[in-house]
Amino acid sequence: MINKTVNSVTEALEGIKDGMTFMLGGFGLSGIPENSIKELVKRNVQDVTCISNNAGVDDFGLGLLLKKKQIKKMISSYVGENAEFERQMLSGELEVELIPQGTLAERCRAAQNGIPAFYTPAGYGTEVAEGKEVRDFNGKPHIMENAFEADFAFVKAWKGDEAGNLIFKGTARNFNPVMCGAAKITVVEVEELVKPGELNPNFIHIPGIFVQRIFQGETYEKRIEQRTTR
Amino acid sequence: MINKTVNSVTEALEGIKDGMTFMLGGFGLSGIPENSIKELVKRNVQDVTCISNNAGVDDFGLGLLLKKKQIKKMISSYVGENAEFERQMLSGELEVELIPQGTLAERCRAAQNGIPAFYTPAGYGTEVAEGKEVRDFNGKPHIMENAFEADFAFVKAWKGDEAGNLIFKGTARNFNPVMCGAAKITVVEVEELVKPGELNPNFIHIPGIFVQRIFQGETYEKRIEQRTTR
Amino acid sequence: MLDKNGIAKRIAQEVQDGFYVNLGIGIPTLVANYVRDDIELEFQSENGILGMGPFPTEDEVDADLINAGKQTITALPGASFFDSSMSFGMIRGQHVDLTILGAMEVAQNGNIANWKIPGKMVKGMGGAMDLVGSAKNIIVAMMHTNKAGDSKLLKACSLPLTGVECVTKIVTNMAVLDIVDKKFRLLERAPGVSVEDIQKATEGDLIIEGDIPEMSI
Amino acid sequence: MLDKNGIAKRIAQEVQDGFYVNLGIGIPTLVANYVRDDIELEFQSENGILGMGPFPTEDEVDADLINAGKQTITALPGASFFDSSMSFGMIRGQHVDLTILGAMEVAQNGNIANWKIPGKMVKGMGGAMDLVGSAKNIIVAMMHTNKAGDSKLLKACSLPLTGVECVTKIVTNMAVLDIVDKKFRLLERAPGVSVEDIQKATEGDLIIEGDIPEMSI
């Protein structure tokens, strides 16, 4: 068993530098790596490119990095919940690349799996296809998309063991599994870190081989964006 | 909940025809759809193309179809355990397309996921690359591979529920999950068919949307090829 | 003239037995409330759940269980959770039978625009481009005209596109239409709305054949 | 001259702390028996397990738990099971650190052939083409010559290739070699084997620099 545990978020983020590209898991505020994000804010790393489906809200998630203007460029699919984001984007302070959500997921998965490029129909005939190769398969046009390249992936799992094996919970799974192993270094924070053998090997969502560092997060706010009840 | 259960293997294989292309899960004899294979032999469907990592052994698995000369073409990665197979292939009775195991898996997964083509380094510079597009990514040559097209996928899972949700066990998982939804009709046999809600939704390997028909297999021999003990 | 719930009610009639359905944010979400209960169907939400149930009670609220609109939800028996790659595999692989989504504009060739107003509003496409790029069956739910009274059913979209020649049906507060030969074909009128009202509110070419029945909802 | 276990023992020295290792069928499988127990490592088997353990006891035998050689195995604490797509994602994505496999022929440019003898034997490549197409670190374990006494270390492969310019190291019953400037470089001799013996048994160009030490195994 190869032990992937580190003792703290400080140790987990060793090696982050200005100008790097980060992947961050989560959909909306669900399943975001809260502890790693806080540490990124604290270290004040600058000019970073973030690949993340959303950009948080004004006072939580990636919104915290946006507020401090640490982000040079965002690669996302939906950013509608963040006023500061919109302001920085429309004023030109923030570079933004919007791409289809499924393409975002698959470009992560491609990086994880050593697939340099693939074809998808998503975005054909739209701005998204500009400058990309178009090719027909079965009479239907598709565009070629490339695997992402990133320096760090910050992932949040529910449970993990010391070997880096991960289990996610509910819809907090989202982009987290496909970002594991999709960057040079994958940093995972978990709600509960257990000993090897405590997780059923049949129900591990992501094997430890895709993870370089794992630590137990200190606290989780798990903020809900739209608390809707019946 | 959309109910996918059928009452028997007979009902499950409704619509199979001579000349069709089938995908069959399993690695060696582990995780093969034993009941569907028996029924294919019984129905004596002819001139079929089989996409399956291996070709069984002389008297079990796909070997049973080979013996009856039901198979026109095999698409596999490794066929070394089957003397009758080798005889038919070397004599030219059987058409054989050998492709790398990872490419086989990914071409299934591509079909499942609506990815018509992708690039892989596997097989570059070998017979496998003949006639295929070669393209450099990051200075390394890759070949383009297409998603498979198949009429039926025959899959074996450990447990399944009436909604078609599946759980596999151990290394009997292998190619089974990636073939679900990769053919026009996916037929799944399980060791244990349970009611919806009995499987933990967090630990379902394949959601029912990828499955058209599910039934409980009558018996499982689960033959072991290399019984090795210490 | 229909309200939002009326549009949802009418669209609910399009949902068939055995359908996996993806509902967009806004009016489409309301469709779930009006589907007949004698048919089998499952709702997929692209953030990673199949078998989505109603909103939770206060006790059931779980931050780890939301839909694509970031609303808290529940999971029905037979539900499953999965990652974003598999979720869009379901969509791209045409395993989802019906997609219902909103739009800012629809053109008579089936083009749709719903993610960006240059210089003003840029929320992003989310999963919409994947959905319209692959779905066999796409119903648009929207108001017939915008707040300024301008038609949203156009000869050509003026906003950046979400997808090309993909919309199959449109249900608005005034009418049900489909797309035939790159034109809008009027199928049904909303209660109290005349064919002339619809003609006036539709910029694109409109096919009107025979008597146009009133919707029954 | 080494026997198969000797080759495996020597290769075991190449396994480093923290390595994920894929072992091919045959001699490579034996490597697991000789790895130092003071380092952390995990064995991956491409049919879908990471953290593969030793063969089972009679009681532990499970038809649903085999390795890529179809042998019954066990799973260690911290193991995981996965499908073939993810398994080859680990391989193609270069997450596996070391691949050890057998060969029929290796050429001095790093080409390898191990899956087909035209007209005679066609077992198939299994996962070998994926492994050699992506692995950063490929060690070939094989006999220096074939049963007829002909060299398996060639100027150019005569059999259909498995991969091109990919082999990094070769451990045979006679020697340890790596590949430099498209030539074989002799690194170590097996006990009792002279440099001349190796020269005679090697068809490809051989770089011999200084004294060639005997292996310590």
Image (cartoon, coloured by chain):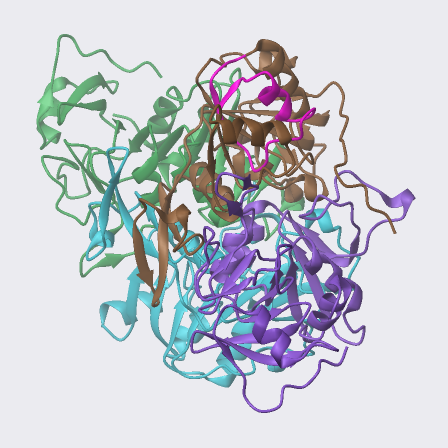
Chain colours: A cyan, B brown, C green, D purple
Give me the residue at 69% from left, 73% from top.
A5
Give me the residue at 72% from left, 63% from top.
A192
Image quarter where the N terminus of chain A lies is bottom right
Q: Quadrant of residue D181?
A: bottom left
Q: How many marks?
A: 0
Q: Is residue A222 left or right of residue C198?
A: right
Percent of width and height locating residue B1: 57, 25
Of A177 and B15, the residue lying toward us = B15
Q: Which SS does the magenta portion mostly show?
A: loop
Give me the residue at 67% from left, 45% from top.
C59
Q: Is residue C49 left or right of residue A140?
A: right
Percent of width and height locating residue C116: 24, 53
Residue B172 highlighted magenta (yes or no): no
Q: Is residue A192 left or right of residue A68?
A: right
Of D131 and C149, the residue lying toward us = D131
In this picture, which residue range is highlighted in magenta? B45-72
Percent of width and height locating residue B51: 50, 32
Residue B52 highlighted magenta (yes or no): yes
Compared to B78, does D216 lie above or below?
Answer: below
Is residue A54 in sight in this rendering?
yes
Q: Quadrant of residue C156?
A: top left
Percent of width and height locating residue A175: 50, 55
Compared to B185, does B148 lie above or below?
Answer: below
Is residue A217 in sight in this rendering?
no
